[in-house]
Amino acid sequence: MQRVAAGVKVMVFNSILWTKGQTGHLAEEDPDFFVDLNIDQIINGITAAYGDYDLRPLFDTIPESIETVRYRQEIFRDLQNMETLAALRDYSTRMKSVNRRLSGIEKLAEYQKQGWHLDAALMYFDAVRDFAARLESADLDSQGLRSLRDYVKEYVDSQSFRETSEEAGRVKAGLSSIRYEMAIGSSRVTVRKDRGRENYNEIVHDAFSKFREVKESAGNRQHLNDPSMNHVEISVLALIARLFSEEFRALMSFYENHTGFIEPVMARIYRESQFYISYLEYIKPVKNAGLEFCIPEIGKDRDIYCIMSFDLALAHKLSSSGLPVVANDFRLSENENTIVVTGPNNGGKTTFARSFGQAHFLAALGLPIPGREARLFLVDNIYTHFEKSEDPENLRGKLEDDLMRMRRILESATERSIIIINEMLSSTTSKDAIQIGRKIIDLIRKKNSVCVYVTFLDEFARLNGVVSMVSHVDPSMPELRTFRVLRSEPNGLAYARAIAEKYGLTYEKIVGRIRE
Amino acid sequence: MRVNLLFRNSDHSNLESIPWNNKDLEKDLDLETIFNAMAHNDSYVFDVCQKTVLGSLKDRETIMYRQEVAKDAIENQALVRDIYATIVNAVAEARKQHFWISRSNPEFVLHESISVLKIYLSALTKIREIGRSALPSLHSEGFRQLFTMIINEFDEEYIDMVSKHLENLRFPRGIYVRGEIGMGSSLTGYTLVVPDIRPDKLMEKIVHIREPHYTYTLPDRDESGAQALAEMRTRSIMETSHIVSESAENVLSFIDRLKEEMAFYLGCINLWNELKFLGAKASFPEPEDDHRKGTVYRGLYDVALTLRTDQAAVGNSLIAENDSIIFITGANRGGKSTLLRAIGQAQLMMQCGMFVAAESFSTYIASAIITHFKREEDSSMAMGKFDEELKRMSKIIDNIHPGSRLLFNESFSSTNVREGSELAMQIINAMLDRGMKIVFVTHFNELAEAYIGNVHRPTFLRAERLEDGTRTFRVIQADPIPTSFGYDIFQKIFGEGGQIQAVTPSENLVDEHTS
């Protein structure tokens, strides 16, 4: 049980990531399939700006219980409400500033240290109070956020919270009202209470105003509120503290009485909220580019589908370039377990396979997944076997390695596993490859794992019991690849490149192209 | 505080309006030769004239506004040259004040800005006096409002007041600031207050007795302390330095602007003088808003060719009521391209407010001026000639809108006549239907012929060739000569010994349109 601030009733709640608090260990390194499915890129992107929070283990660990997955999905569903998300985000941003203000203050001079401590505390009280108020008015359905709301409300209403925050406000008001005048010479500084002299900048500004209308001020006037101090200023500050002794005494007393003011569960929530915020932040540009995400229905059944699924790593990369991302549907009914993907090179086969794997992985973490609508099953693991381009020397050795890896996969895979194979048997003749591949597909079927098999060999797609999907080309514009992967018969056509009205210089085209 | 010699009512930067096809225009119309004559070895004048000429105006009012200023400039050449020289000198002197000093130190920036402002203020004073004495002989709105503004805004009194502040800002008695306590108890919000310039010792003593104050004195040889004090001074005058340096920059930008606009008119003067010296005629054109007014010119010639050959070129005349499409056909090296260039140059010069190289010139104001010239040298390995032409054409289509004037020179001649003509007709028809104006130089007679009697009422010009084959380099109004390649081919196949007599097509048969 967590230690809680005085006056707060002890409650079970302490996490927005785990239903019963975190049990079990977090993974210490990325799972093997991350690289092949480009999930390492996704996680790198998600955590790039969140290095302080050590989020990676959270994204590396697939929770064992379906309750935890649903606990997170519910919270994500609540966060679809922009105001709820804004509340969480705002709390997080302000907690970050609080921590920044507190970091390294022990090394500072007395008045400076106490000043930073006070400013951090003020910000913390504000952040928590606002968070409580915003949660109060939020429409919450998730168990996690409802418990959080109750917890924060009780904390804010506690007497100690109220008294401490009021004291901080009084101390700050005293300091803010201070005005002093400095005369800075070449070797001395004299301070006194302010005598109310006229602002000379305004006078100069007016005198020179005539020159300033030519072009508007470049703006971006540097604000003179840099809070760092050099050692002369620190000495001068001590003199000012003598001129205004009452205000500075109050500052010291606040510091001494309220050194550790952050409540432990509030600190934990701050870190855990990064799991939600960082992911939503990562998918935002992708959403803005017009792609959809959904919270999948998740269960143990094998009747699965996803509409408008896409490769998140690719979509994130393309979202900044404005290039379109192709989305594909997939579906496997109860008795189907293997999809064979064929079609022309660079037609989107591998991308399709990756998006299939990503969807299941992201869903297992309780995250919204790329797609309009989906039903998936909770995977226990994902295995990938991607063609490695290195080592062309020893083909025999390579085939051996490939098959060894495949055997290990088949040994550990279960009927809750996904196996993704990408151009595995290219180091042997087609005839051999077909024979071996057929065997492997058979073995996987017996395991009843779900398999996506990407290959340039049409024969696999014609095997009984496999689902054939083909990357398509638009017949009217064969030179443009569509990257659409659809369920259909394999077709080994060579796509002739048709040059039609290449430069758009026919009468009709020109008339259409000339703008008003 | 605006210069407004190029535009009546804005500080438009004409940099922005450099058209996408400026390189093509320069190359196809031989503009560099013209810019060189305008620049007279002043590379700054060259750059200004280049962008001003290329940044074509689209409105008649501004064109006429510039014409008035240009006329004043031509008649008051000393005024333009004196002001330009004053600015060049002031800028050179100010540049000497920019030492190696870091721009990021506000104290240095402030000192530098003070010095530079003093130089500019004295240049402005000089320009004010030049303007004051020239004012009676100036007629253009542009020059008159400029000098009136300078005389009013920078009078003696104002210059004195500003100079006094510039002295105070050297802070002879230290810097006085008001401050607050900010984040982390920092000393912050430094605001400069009116400094003690000449302290009254007695008054200061009394004040000191009444008010508690403390002084921090730097220990001797405390270098880091001196550094820290300098930092505080820097922060105190940060905003001040910003105000003063921004003012200096703005005065400079006014002066730069004035220099730039003067440079254009200086370029006009230079070219005008050069043409007069060569005995070539120049006149101010009449731009038309109404696209139905046609194109009329007398004594139009290629400025660049005249400058290159140092002699007045053959002038051409035309009265074309309909100028939607003008075909120029006829003998090779007969002056077709020269006339096309002359038309393009005149159109550009007209639309930047200059005079043109003709006794008179009038045409409508094009929304864009586009050239598509055959490019011998562009036939690279990577891209066939024809491909290159089409690609360039396609880019043009992407960039034109109704009211553009397009100058074609032997376009699509990199393929055979049939294909080239067919393609050209598709393009011409589409463009005419979308409201473009075209001048098309071609040796594809059958292309031009196809337009005889066309609904867009084409105008046909032809490079003149006398009966004895002499080229006059005049281009006259005349229908294209029907030609047949059949005989040539026949002869080639049957050899010189063929029994059939060759018949030279007579030009006289179709010359009745010649005016």
Image (spheres, coloured by chain):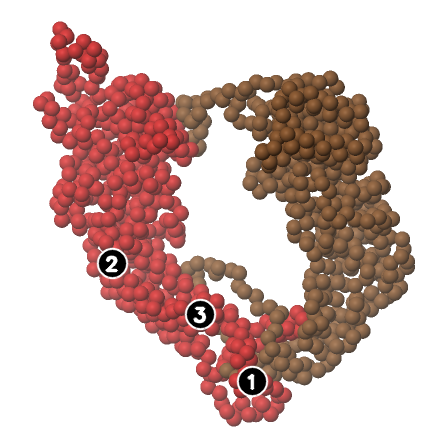
Residue A460 % position (x, y) = 68, 21
Mark 1: secondary structure:
loop
Residue B429 % position (x, y) = 36, 23
From the viewer's perspective, is A391 left or right of B60? right
The residue that label 3 is drawn on is B109
- Taking depth in this image into account, of B201 and A3 the one nearest to the observer is A3
Disc 1 with disc 2 on a shared chain: yes
Mark 3: secondary structure:
helix
Disc 1 with disc 3 on a shared chain: yes
Three-letter code for the amino acid on which mark 3 is drawn: Val
At horizontal 86% and vertical 63% (from top left) the residue drawn is A5
Indicate the quadrant where residue A386 lies: top right
Of labels 1 and 2, earlier in sequence is 2
At horizontal 79% and vertical 35% (from top left) the residue drawn is A412
Specify the colour of chain B. Answer: red
Three-letter code for the amino acid on which mark 2 is drawn: Val
Specify the colour of chain A. Answer: brown
The residue that label 1 is drawn on is B218
Chain ID at mark 1: B
Q: Are marks 1 and 3 in contact (CB under 8 Å)?
A: no
Give the quarter of the figure containing the C terminus of chain A. Answer: top left
Residue A377 % position (x, y) = 79, 33
Chain ID at mark 3: B
Q: Which label sits on residue B80?
A: 2
Nearer mark to the viewer, of 1 and 3? 1
Mark 2: secondary structure:
helix
